[in-house]
Amino acid sequence: MDQNTEFVTQHHIKRTLEHLKRNRMNGHYAKDQKDLMEILDELCERKSTVAVGGSMTLKETGVLDWLREEDFEFYDRYAEGLDAAAITAIYRKSFGANYFFTSTNALTEAGELVNIDGNGNRVAAMIYGPDKVIVIAGINKLVKDEAAAYERLRNFAAPSNSVRLNRKTPCAITGQCSNCNSPDRICASYATIRWQTRPDRIHVILVNEILGY
Ligand code: SF4
C-alpha cells in the first residue's frame, strides 16, 4: 500500500473502530498478523473453552493452529476422523464455549457485521451463546455500508466459497449471484449485527492485510 492509499485506509479504519464502539462492540486494530497474535494473547484467558466458525481467515492467520497449541479446551470441528454427527455435536456444544472465533463476510464503516451463512451455526453463535465472540477481519472485508456489504457477499464471498466447496451453483460458473434455487445453494441465512446488549461480548480485530474471502 502506498502512502496515499494508506492515509485514506487509516481514516476508514478509524471511523469503523469508533462506530463499533458506538454500537457497543470492541474494535481493535492490528497492523499485521504478528500484532493480531499479540492482541489475541492478551484477550483470551487460558484454560477456557474455545470454538470456531468456518473461516479461511482463521486458517490463513494461523489462529486455528494457535488454538490447538495453546492451553485451551478446543471444540475442534476440523479434527481428523469426525463424522457428520460428531461435527453437528460440536456445532451445538460451541454455543456454550467461553470464546467463539470467526471472521465476518463484511464489516461496514457504520460498525456492522454482515454475514450470509449456509448451516447457520456460525451466525447463530455470533448472535447468541458463547460468552465472547472474537471476530478477525482483513482490510478487504471493510465496506462503506450494508448495501455494499451485501453486494460484496453476493458477488464475491459467496461465489468464491461456492468454487472452494465445489458446489454446483450458477455463481460457481459466472462469479456472480443469481439468487439460485440450486440444491447446492450455500446462502441460507442473512444476518446484520448492529448492536450488543452486552458491551464486553464482541471483539472485532481489523487486520491491515488481505485475508479470507
Ligand atoms: S444464492 Fe446461489 S447463486 Fe447466489 S451466491 Fe448463493 S449459491 Fe451463489
Image (cartoon, rainbow, N blue to C red):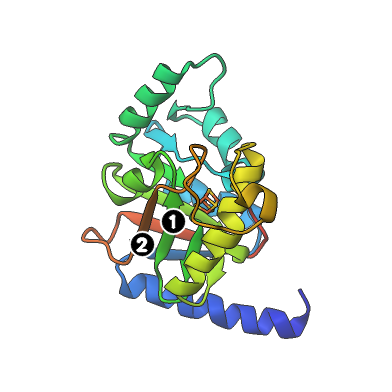
Give residue 115's mark: 1
- Relative vertical location of residue 170 with respect to residue 192 in this rendering, above or below: above
Q: Are marks 2 and 1 in contact (CB under 8 Å)?
A: yes
Residue drawn where x is 26% and y is 61% of the image: 196
- Relative vertical location of residue 156 with respect to residue 149 in this rendering, above or below: above
Give residue 184's mark: none
Looking at the rendered image, the quarter that the N terminus falls into is: bottom right
Q: Is residue 168 or residue 108 the one in the foreground? A: 168
Q: x%, y% of residue 145?
A: 46, 76
Quadrant assignment, res 211: bottom right
Q: x%, y% of residue 22?
A: 32, 75
Who comes first in sequence, dot 2 or dot 1?
Answer: 1
Q: Amino acid at mark 1?
A: Asn
Instruction: Report helix, strand or loop for mark 2.
Output: strand
Looking at the rendered image, the quarter that the C terminus falls into is: bottom right
- Relative vertical location of residue 187 with respect to residue 203 in this rendering, above or below: above
Does residue 206 appear anywhere in the picture?
no
Assess disc 1: are there few (<14), some (14-19) or many (≥20) residues with their C-alpha within 10 Å of its C-alpha. many
